[in-house]
Image: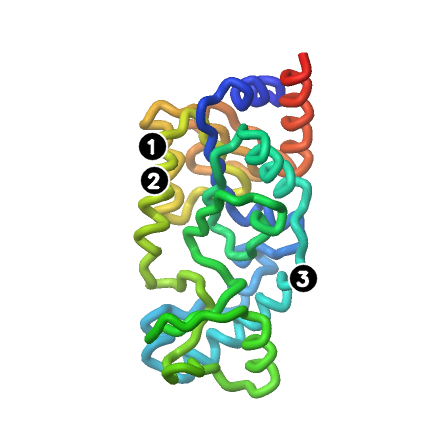
Amino acid sequence: MIDRLAQWISQARNTVVFTGAGISTESGIPDFRSPGGIWATSQPVYYDDFVASESSRLEYWRQKSAAFTEFADATPNIGHQVLADWETRDQLHGVITQNIDGLHQDAGSKNVLEIHGTARSVACLDCDWQDDTRPWNEKFNAEGVPPTCPDCGGHVKHATVSFGQSLDADVLNQSFAWIQDCDLFLALGSSLVVHPAANMPVVAKSQGAKLVIITRDSTPLDRDADLVINGSLGETLVAVDSAVKELRDD
């Protein structure tokens, strides 16, 4: 399977990668949906509730503060680094990610579409103000009060997509434009159950691309894939990268 995937990557005209939480768990970032994740003990705050209720904003910031503390100092793992190397070698067009941790960019990837936004920034809902998350996280931890915009006094939240909040249309449209032009689509570390992201592999396959799924557990789309590899993403990508380099050097 490793050699077959290496052949496909070497021969592909346009490869696009889609990543989920599974690539970041190997950097020590917990999957929020897992039994040990924050949603096992807390109910996520919906966007409308955040806007309407001070108590909901307080709970939102409590959850986000805990999550940010868990991954703020995380570093990219070998899986992130392999993908960044493929982009440098023109063997990967770009990465579409569900993750909000920014580790693809830290690894050196340039073409990254974050469909769920980024936890690296906070933003005002009422104006264009944005800032780095860390000082505002520290401010919340010190004061216990949801922050407000220093420019207009509006509500401030992480620049991520909350439950009940619409995805960024421009990012979503760009993602599907990439997918429609690719001939190899790799879905890495995603359960492929959260929509509309879970529909991306389906669209890629319908456009004629080969679909490869690499993750520890089975997904609802395994039967539609051209290749499924269950195992560690880091170990698998290193093995594939080694095989790709061997093909290049032959």
Relative vertical location of residue 53 with respect to residue 203 in this rendering, above or below: below
Mark 3: give few (<14), some (14-19) or many (20+) Cα within 10 Å: few
Q: Amino acid at mark 1?
A: Gln
Mark 2: give few (<14), some (14-19) or many (20+) Cα within 10 Å: some
Q: Are marks 2 and 3 in contact (CB under 8 Å)?
A: no
* Number of marks: 3
**The N terminus - image quarter:** top right
Cα separation between marks 2 and 3 = 31 Å
Q: Quickly name the residue at label 1.
A: 180
Q: Quickly name the residue at label 3.
A: 73
Which circle marks residue 29 in the picture? none
Q: Residue at x 43, y 24 (%)?
A: 210
Q: Quadrant of residue 181?
A: top left
Q: Residue at x 39, y 79 (%)?
A: 155
Q: How is the image coloured?
A: rainbow
Relative vertical location of residue 131 with respect to residue 73 in this rendering, above or below: below
Cα separation between marks 1 and 2 = 6 Å
Cα separation between marks 3 and 1 = 35 Å
Q: Are marks 1 and 2 in contact (CB under 8 Å)?
A: yes
Q: Are marks 3 and 1 in contact (CB under 8 Å)?
A: no
Residue 102 at x, y percent in the picture = 55, 54
Relative vertical location of residue 15 with respect to residue 31 in this rendering, above or below: above
First of labels 3, 1 by sequence position: 3
Q: Nearer the viewer, residue 235 or 73?
A: 73
**The C terminus - image quarter:** top right
Q: Residue at x 51, y 24 (%)?
A: 227
Q: Amino acid at mark 2?
A: Phe
Q: Quickly name the residue at label 2.
A: 176
First of labels 2, 3 by sequence position: 3
Q: Residue furthest top?
A: 250
